Amino acid sequence: AALAAEIAKLQEENMASKQSNIDTSQSYDDSERKGDEMDPGDQLDHIRELQAEISQERTMYSDLLTEHEDLLALLAQTDCEKKCLQQALANVEGNDAVEKVISEAEEIIVGQFG
């Protein structure tokens, strides 16, 4: 349930970002129409501004990609630890104890995160 809520939150943020990009692209269309009216110096300044914005977006994307990879690695580590702990508990107390603990954990998670 917590994972579903987080996915929904990310999808909402993604939709908001797409809407922002649409608004931005419309303003670029307006500036392109003005391009014939702009003198070459202003056009060069505008191109440099756009290049700076693109560079900033690339940096943000790279940072996001790095964070995503770090989170995937952390998730894989957590999954491995969980499996090892489940196996250790099953060896000591049996599979019924594992199922009981998993059920209790699910109840706690639903209680905390909905």
Image (spheres, rainbow, N blue to C red):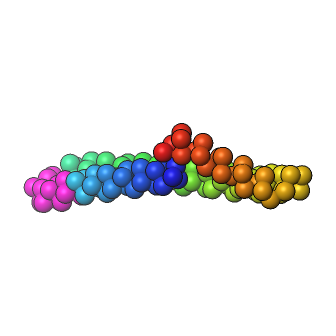
Report the residue at 61% width, 49% height from top: 106
Residue 76 visible somewhere in the drawing: yes
Report the residue at 66% width, 46% height from top: 104
Magenta region? 25-40
- Who is closer to the viewer here, 3 or 27? 3
Magenta stretch: includes residue 34:
yes
Report the residue at 12% width, 60% height from top: 33
Q: Describe residue 84's horizontal placement relative to residue 39 as left or right.
A: right
Measured from the top left, where is residue 71 in percent x and y?
61, 51
Measured from the top left, where is residue 109 in percent x and y?
58, 45
- Who is closer to the viewer here, 39 or 80? 80
Q: Describe residue 56's horizontal placement relative to residue 108 as left or right.
A: left
Report the residue at 28% width, 51% height from top: 20
Taking the view exactly as shown, the residue that stands out farthest to the left is 37
Measured from the top left, where is residue 37 in percent x and y?
10, 55
**Numbered disc total:** 0
Magenta stretch: includes residue 107:
no
Q: Describe residue 43's horizontal placement relative to residue 8 as left or right.
A: left
Measured from the top left, where is residue 80 in percent x and y?
76, 56
- Who is closer to the viewer here, 84 or 58? 84
Is most of the magenta stretch helix, strand or loop?
A: helix
Q: Describe residue 110's horizontal placement relative to residue 11 as left or right.
A: right
Residue 10 visible somewhere in the drawing: no
Taking the view exactly as shown, the residue that stands out farthest to the top is 112
